[in-house]
Image (tube, coloured by chain):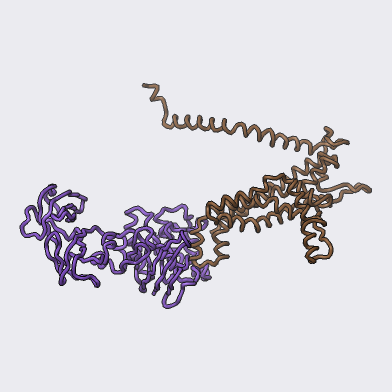
Chain colours: A brown, B purple
Amino acid sequence: MSEQAAYRPGELEAEAQAADNRSRWMLALPAVVIITLAAAGPLMVMVVYSFLTPGDYGNVVWKFSLEGWMNTLVQRDIFDDTLIWADAHLSIFWRSFSLSLITTVLTLIFGVPTAWFIATQPPGKREFWLFLITVPFWTNLLVRTIAIQELLRSEGVINLVLLKLGIIDAPIQMMFTNFAIGFGMTYVYLPLMVLPVYAAVDKLDFRLVEAAHDLYAGRWTAFRRVILPLIKPGIIAGSILVFIPSLGAYVTPRVLGGGKNLMFGNLIELQFGQGRNWPLGAALSLMLMAAVMIALMWYVRVTSREQSDG
Amino acid sequence: MIEIDKVTKTFGAGDVAFTALRDVSVTIRENEFFTLLGPSGCGKTTLLRLIAGFEPPTIGAIRLSGRDITRLPPNQRPVNTVFQNYALFPHMSVAGNIAFGLEMLGKPKDEIAKTVDEMLRLVRMEELKHRKTSEISGGQQQRVALARALAPHPEVLLLDEPLSALDLKLRKEMQIELKRLQSETGITFVFVTHDQEEALTMSDRIAVMSGGRILQIGNPREIYERPSERFVANFIGASNFLNGQLSAGSVTLEAGGTFTVEPPQGVADGKVSVLIRPEHVTVAGTGTDGAALTATVENVVYSGEATVAHLKLKTGEAIKARASNLPGASGLLETGVQVGVSVAPGAVTVLVD
């Protein structure tokens, strides 16, 4: 009896809670192990490699060097050894950034109305449209990108049709341009915008839109003041899902942009392949990661500040 | 003020077509508290949405102060709505919600701020001005929805069952509050409800609806005491329906007793149905002397303020008698006892069947 009295209030609950916590951790353990091994491990390897010296045939030599990091932004002039900006790298950074931004904006322009259309269909039809959105995922990205090439190239479908119709006299050069990359990436990433925006529109209470109209808002104002703020979480999620993989895109710029129009991902690949400069490749990868994180933090901060306004 | 002119509304087409309103005509007067009353699916909310402009009528016209607004979109009508579930903007504060309509009308900033404060005072919500709408209770949300709809000072305020989500006590409070707001603002209120007591308490006039039609329009007293049809009588309050014979301005019930009545237009002499409200029926006491009718006590239900006796007349028809409980009253009637039943003069209403 005295033993029972020794329990302090809340002790049993605390114990049960702790046990509950432990069992939930056990459930998450396999995933935690995989993430640690597959993400944190290689990341550490990259950090280390970025501070080493490149070997003659790829790989690295275990000798500390800042050359890898220096080479991301500057390069030594071959004649007088002075440091000059690595123009080639800077133009690639700029192309990656601007093309990713354009891709995000284009997927927003095309994706939001599409998501709206699907979400306002009767429930039975919605599933059909969502199913159509996922169809492209069934085929390998590389195959789809090569198919786009068939559309765009000089003897491709678009040029042939335009020539036959007499709209143009000579084929338009579309392959290996920034246009081709932007076109391809917009197509590839469009579903990643449509799906989160659809989820947000699906949750939208349409009576709020009626309330806005009732309170003298026209269609555009109702969209800007009521619909847009309420589906913003979906738009943020979609933008992140499109912008980040776009920055590091590899296959699409490689196939549609050719050897001249490199993007960040291709530049990194080059260092581990023909370039034989692994430390530079590792430094570039880490740089990309940092850029993505900064962009993300800025984006989330700006959008959440707007949201708290009245 | 508002004229609904022969309006029909059909949703869908072909086999799935559903007619929500059938040839409805009604005129709502200025400064009136007008209630659309009926069971769910009777078309009352559809009629409200037509006035707000959310749906166009299939046939017919709607006029506001003489102007045809049938084709006007909702944002161009001087009409505001209090929605059933309030539909407050969750991403705006209480003040932001109330200011919305004024901002849309392009009012100057200082005037908006002044009106918002005025509205907050009117609905007694000053302290919660900067709260998010998700952080306030249902009753408070209700008040914000009211303030938001009243702020642009519309010509007409539409209220779609605004009290149905509140608990009984709060509902009673808000009923009084709504009446006060209506008289203070002088705005025409069109109120939709399925609660007959609410309708009787608050309205200047009531339109009773069923199956997409308006059955009767009148003030609460007319609707309660002189319902035109069996449906109206049955829907509003408790009722006794008895059979009788009408001839030359008086009705002789099959169960006995002759009563002077004012038969409604279009009812010819002959067999009729009549309504007698339970509170107009008195149990005269055991025995049958002096009373027009005799009945057997079937069941007696005590409900605090009143007692209802369920009786069976000699014709087999059921009749209820309702009496207020007085202090120190003796015990209840026993079941199976024969009693005399009297009906108050003027309490018999002939129904159009």
Where residue B317 appears, x then y in whole percent?
18, 55
| B246 displayed left or right of A147 | left
Q: Report the residue at 14% width, 50% height from top.
A: B297
The one of A43 and A232 positioned closer to us in this rendering: A232
Where residue B233 appears, x then y in whole percent?
26, 62
Relative to A16, residue B249 above or below = below
Where residue A39 appears, x then y in whole percent?
69, 37
Where residue B311 appears, x then y in whole percent?
16, 53
| B296 displayed left or right of A121 | left
Q: Quadrant of residue A171?
A: bottom right
The one of B229 and B179 positioned closer to us in this rendering: B229
| B321 displayed left or right of B50 | left
| A73 displayed left or right of A110 | right
Relative to B67, residue B174 above or below = above
Q: In the picture, which quadrant includes the C terminus of chain B?
A: bottom left
Relative to B39, residue B58 above or below = below
Relative to B113, residue B166 above or below = above
Q: Report the residue at 19% width, 53% height from top.
A: B308
Residue lying furthest left in this view?
A: B289
Kindly tell me whether residue B351 is visible in this rendering: yes
Q: How many marks?
A: 0
Kindly tell me whether residue B112 is visible in this rendering: no
Residue lying furthest bottom in this view?
A: B66
Q: In the picture, which quadrant includes the N terminus of chain B?
A: bottom left
